[in-house]
Amino acid sequence: NLITEENTNAKKIRKLVQIPSLSESIPDNIQYLLIGGGTASFSAFRAIKSADPTARVLVISAEGYLPHMRPPLSKELWYGDDTEMAKSLNFHQWNGTSRSLFYEPEPFYTPVEELTTAKNGGISLARGWKVESINVSKKKVKLNDGKEISYDKCLIATGSVPKTLKLYDDANEELKNKFSVFRSISDFEDLWEQLGHIKSIAIIGGGFLGSELAASLANKGKKNGVKIYQIFKEKGNMGKVLPKYLSHWTTEKVRNEGVEVVTETEVENCSLENNKRQVNLKLSNGKNISVDHVIMAVGAKPNTELATDAGLEIDSKLDGYLVNSELQARTDLYIAGDCACFYDKQLGRRRVEHHDHAVISGRLAGENMAGAAKPYQHQPMFWSDIGPSVGYEAIGIVDSSLATMGVFAKGNHKDPSLLANETDQNTLTNKKETNEELVSKNNESISENDYNKGVVFYLKNDVIVGIVLWNLFNRMSIARQVLKTNRCYKDLNEVAKLFNIHGD
Ligand code: FAD
Ligand code: NAD
Ligand code: NAD
C-alpha cells in the first residue's frame, strides 16, 4: 500500500517515507482531522491549538516530508554559494536571517501513537499516507490501505497539482523522462542534481513559476555554462498579471539574467534526438530548439480528487471546492488554500493560488473549526521575486485584462520631484486611445530605470480591486486599507502619494 511521491515526474517516482509505517498506529477517531500537509494545513493547526489548547489534531499528508513552505524552492534556494545550506533546505531570507523550509522540527509533532492519550492533546502527522475517500454523512475518511478514521471536524487542504502539456501526456516513457514539473522538495532535489551534469534546459510557461525559475536557474547555471530557454505564449513575462509595459520591462530583466526568452510562441511538437540524449522542441515560430531537459511550468490545477466520491461541489468556472465565506463545504467540513473556491464579501467568488492566502484561509478555517464562525475578510497578499532586480508584492485582483494605472519613481529615486505615470486600457476617463499612445510613447522614450519602483492600481468600474507594489516594500497595510475603501477615486496620483514611493 506504499504510495508514491506527489509529483507527476515520470520515472522519478520514489518510494515514500511512510511514518508511521503501519496504519494501526493511527487513531480510529479524532477531534480535528486535517487532510494535506501544506501551508494551509499548518496554518489551520496553529489556529486550532491557540483557540483550543488541548485539541487533538491529526494531519494526514501524502508528502514524505514535514509541513513546509514552497516559495523558496523557486527562488532563495538557488541563490548563495553554500551548497550544503541549500541541500539541507535552509535559505537566507530577504532580511539576511537564515531559516529552514520546514515550519516545525520533527519533535514538535506528537507521535501518532500518543495522540489519543497525551494529557494536553497535540498535533500529530501521518506522512506518506493518503486519504482516498471521505464519507461526509458518516464523518469518516478512508486511507490508501483501507483504514477508516472518524472525525469531529475535518479540513481539506489538498492544494494543487502541476498541469502537464498534451504533447507530454501523449509521449512515450523515454521521451517523458526528459520532462518534469516543479512543485515539491523532491522536484527541487532532482533539478539541483540535474543541473550538475546537463547543459541546456527549456522552461515552458511565462507565469509565476516559469519566470522565477528561469531567473534562478540562469543564475545558478552561469558557472557551469548551462543555457536556459523560457518559452511562452504571452508577449512578456507575467503577461497575465502585469500591464504590458511592465511585463515587457520584466522580460528585458530576465534576458539580462542570461535567459533566452522566446515570447508569443508555443511548443508544437517534441522528439528525441542526438542518440536520445536531447529533446527537439518544434516551436510555433518556425524554429527548433534542442535541449537536455524540459520543465513544464504551465499552471496548476486544484487537487479536488476527493470531490466526486464525497459528493462535494466544484466551481464550474474557477474550479476548486465550492465553499461559503466561512470556508465551509458541508457541516463540520472545511476547505482552505489553493483548492478552495470561496466567497469574498468584497471581491466576489475567488480562488487564489498563493502562500499568504494559504496562511490566511488556513487560519480562518482552523478558527472556525474551533467554533469561531468568522467570514473571510482579511485580504491576503502575494509576492514574487524574479532575479535580483524584480520583486513585487500584490493584493486583491491582479489581472492584466483589467484597466490599470501605474505611478513610478522616475530615474534616480532620490529625486522626489519626478513621477512617471502609466495608464493601460484606462477606463477611468474613457480616453483609451490617448492612454495607449502614452504607454507606447513612454515605452520608447523612458529609460529602463523608470520602472524600478512604483505602484500599479487595477480597476473594475473605476474602483480599485487590486494593487501591485513594484520593488516597494513594507507598504502592504496601506494597500490593504486603500482596497478596503472599495470606492472610486478621482485622482489616482493622489492615492499613489499615500505610498510614499520615494520614501526609502
Ligand atoms: P500545498 O502546499 O500544495 O499542500 C497540499 C498538501 O496536500 C500536500 O502536502 C499534498 O501532498 C497533500 N495532499 C493532497 N492530496 C492529499 C490526500 N488525498 N491525502 C493526504 N494528503 C494530500 N506563493 C506566493 O504567494 N509567493 C511565492 O513566492 C510562491 N512561490 C511558490 C514557489 C513554488 C515552487 C510553488 C510550487 C508555489 C509557490 N507559491 C507562492 C504558491 C504557494 O506555495 C501555494 O499557494 C501554497 O503552497 C498552497 O498551499 P496549500 O496548503 O493550499 O497546498
Ligand atoms: P501560472 O498560471 O502562473 O502560469 C502558467 C503559464 O503557463 C502561463 O504563461 C500560461 O500561458 C502557460 N500555459 C498554460 N497552458 C499552456 C499550454 N498548454 N502550453 C503552453 N503554455 C501554457 O502557473 P505556474 O507559473 O505554472 O505556477 C504553478 C503554480 O505555482 C500556480 O499555482 C502559481 O500560483 C504557483 N506559484 C506561485 C508563485 C508566486 O506566487 N510567486 C511562484 C511560483 C509558483
Ligand atoms: P510576512 O507575514 O509578510 O511573511 C511571511 C513569509 O513570507 C516569510 O517567510 C517571508 O520571508 C515571506 N515573504 C513575505 N513577503 C515576501 C517578499 N516580498 N519576498 C520574499 N518573501 C516574502 O512576514 P515577514 O517576513 O516578517 O515580513 C514583514 C514585512 O516585510 C512585510 O511587510 C513584508 O512585505 C516585508 N518584506 C520585505 C521584503 C524585501 O525584499 N524588502 C521581503 C519580504 C518581506
Image (spheres, rainbow, N blue to C red):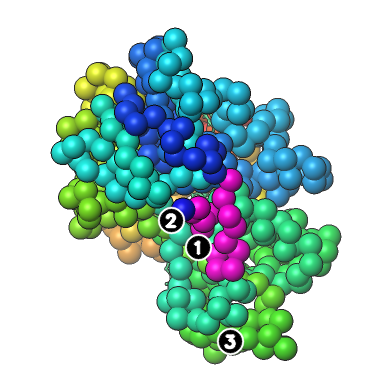
Find residue 140 and report its horizontal and vertical position in percent. 26, 38
* The disc label shown at residue 90, or none: none
Q: Upstream in the sequence, badge 2 or badge 1?
A: 1
User: What residue would you read off at disc 3?
Assistant: 271
* The disc label shown at residue 161, or none: 2
Q: Is residue 290 shown left or right of residue 302?
A: right
Query: Callout 1: 10 Å neighbours few (<14), some, many (20+)?
Result: some
Query: Callout 3: 10 Å neighbours few (<14), some, many (20+)?
Result: some
Q: Give 438 or 19, whichever is nearer the viewer.
A: 19
Q: Upstream in the sequence, badge 2 or badge 3?
A: 2
Find residue 262 and report its horizontal and vertical position in percent. 58, 73
Q: Give 197 or 113, whichever is nearer the viewer.
A: 113
Label 2 close to label 1 by CB (< 8 Å): yes
| 170 lies above or below 80 | below
Q: CA distance from mark 2 to mark 3?
A: 25 Å
Magenta span has 342?
Answer: no
User: What residue would you read off at disc 1?
Assistant: 8
Start-end of magenta stretch = 2-17
Kind of residue sitting beneath label 3: Ser
Quadrant of residue 391 within the rendered picture: top right
Helix, strand or loop at label 2? It is: strand
Kind of residue sitting beneath label 1: Thr
Kind of residue sitting beneath label 2: Val
Point out the image quarter for the C terminus. Answer: top right
Helix, strand or loop at label 3? It is: strand
